[in-house]
Amino acid sequence: MIILMLAAAMTIAMLIATAFGFHEESRRARQEQKIRSTRPFGLID
């Protein structure tokens, strides 16, 4: 019984970690797109 509860807790933790990873990745992509749109041709100040 303890093993099943541990497995369930690990599954929930992995789902939360995956959702957090997707959130961070989308935030990073939006930030990158914003930088690309404000600096054409990759020019750096």
Image (cartoon, rainbow, N blue to C red):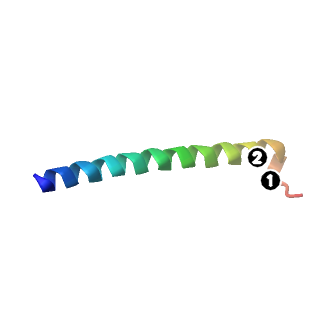
Q: Name the amino acid type tagged 2.
A: Arg
Mark 1 crowdedness (10 Å alpha carbons): few <14, some 14-19, many ≥20: few
Percent from the top left, x then y, of residue 3? Answer: 14, 56
SS class of the residue under badge 1? Answer: helix
Residue 31 circle label: none
Q: Residue at x 14, y 55 (%)?
A: 2
Percent from the top left, x then y, of residue 9? Answer: 27, 50
> Does label 2 or label 1 sit earlier along the sequence?
2
Q: Which residue is the extreme one toward the left?
A: 1
Instruction: Tell me, yes or no, whether the two marked residues, 2 and 1, touch with CB atoms within 8 Å.
Output: yes
Q: Is residue 20 shown left or right of residue 7?
A: right
Q: Name the amino acid type tagged 1.
A: Gly
Q: Is residue 9 shown left or right of residue 41?
A: left
Query: Where does label 1 land, which residue?
Result: 42
Query: Where does label 2 land, which residue?
Result: 36
Work out whether residue 23 or residue 7 is closer to the camera in this orientation and state it.
7
Q: CA distance from mark 2 to mark 1?
A: 7 Å
SS class of the residue under badge 2? Answer: helix
Quadrant holding the C terminus: bottom right
